[in-house]
Image (tube, rainbow, N blue to C red):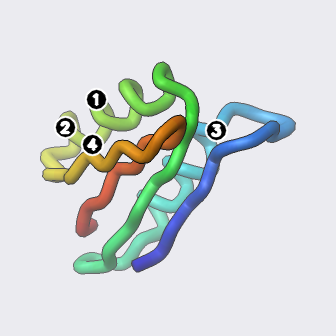
């Protein structure tokens, strides 16, 4: 499973590496997107839903994780 961690400070929006990973993923590849930003988490869930991709939500203290298969 490929994990994309967008926690911490980035010089740009955490959505950029997350969406890039989704677009570059091979069909059938498993991904995990990790963030500590609730707005980014909500936006990613909405984006995946619009693409018709089912996902699993995992909450661990201050981090949130979306697991799915492309």
Q: Are marks 1 and 2 in contact (CB under 8 Å)?
A: yes
Q: CA distance from mark 4 to mark 1?
A: 6 Å
Which residue is the site of mark 3?
Answer: 14
Q: Quadrant of residue 32?
A: bottom left
Q: Earlier in the sequence, mark 3 or mark 4?
A: 3
53 vs 29: above or below: above
Callout 2: 10 Å neighbours few (<14), some, many (20+)?
few
Residue 52 in picture, x, y percent from top left: 13, 46
31 vs 62: above or below: below
Callout 4: 10 Å neighbours few (<14), some, many (20+)?
some
Residue 22 in picture, x, y percent from top left: 43, 58
Q: Residue at x 19, y 37 (%)?
A: 49
Which residue is the site of mark 4?
Answer: 48
Q: Residue at x 37, y 25 (%)?
A: 42
Q: Quadrant of residue 37?
A: top right
Quadrant showing the N terminus: bottom left
Which residue is the site of mark 1?
Answer: 46
Callout 3: 10 Å neighbours few (<14), some, many (20+)?
many
In front of the other: 27 or 61:
61
Q: Are marks 1 and 3 in contact (CB under 8 Å)?
A: no
Q: Are marks 2 and 4 in contact (CB under 8 Å)?
A: yes
Quadrant showing the C terminus: bottom left
In front of the other: 38 or 31:
38
Q: Residue furthest top?
A: 39
Q: Are marks 3 and 4 in contact (CB under 8 Å)?
A: no
Which residue is the site of mark 2?
Answer: 49
20 vs 60: above or below: below
Callout 1: 10 Å neighbours few (<14), some, many (20+)?
few
Q: CA distance from mark 1 to mark 3?
A: 15 Å
In front of the other: 63 or 42:
63
Q: Earlier in the sequence, mark 1 or mark 3?
A: 3
């Amino acid at each position: 499973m490929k994990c994309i961690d967008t926690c911490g400070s980035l010089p740009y929006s955490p959505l950029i590496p997350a969406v890039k990973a989704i677009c570059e993923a091979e069909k059938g590849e498993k991904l995990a997107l990790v963030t500590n930003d609730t707005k980014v988490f909500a936006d990613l869930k909405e984006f995946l839903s619009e693409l018709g991709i089912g996902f699993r939500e995992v909450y661990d203290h201050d981090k949130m994780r979306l697991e799915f298969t492309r």
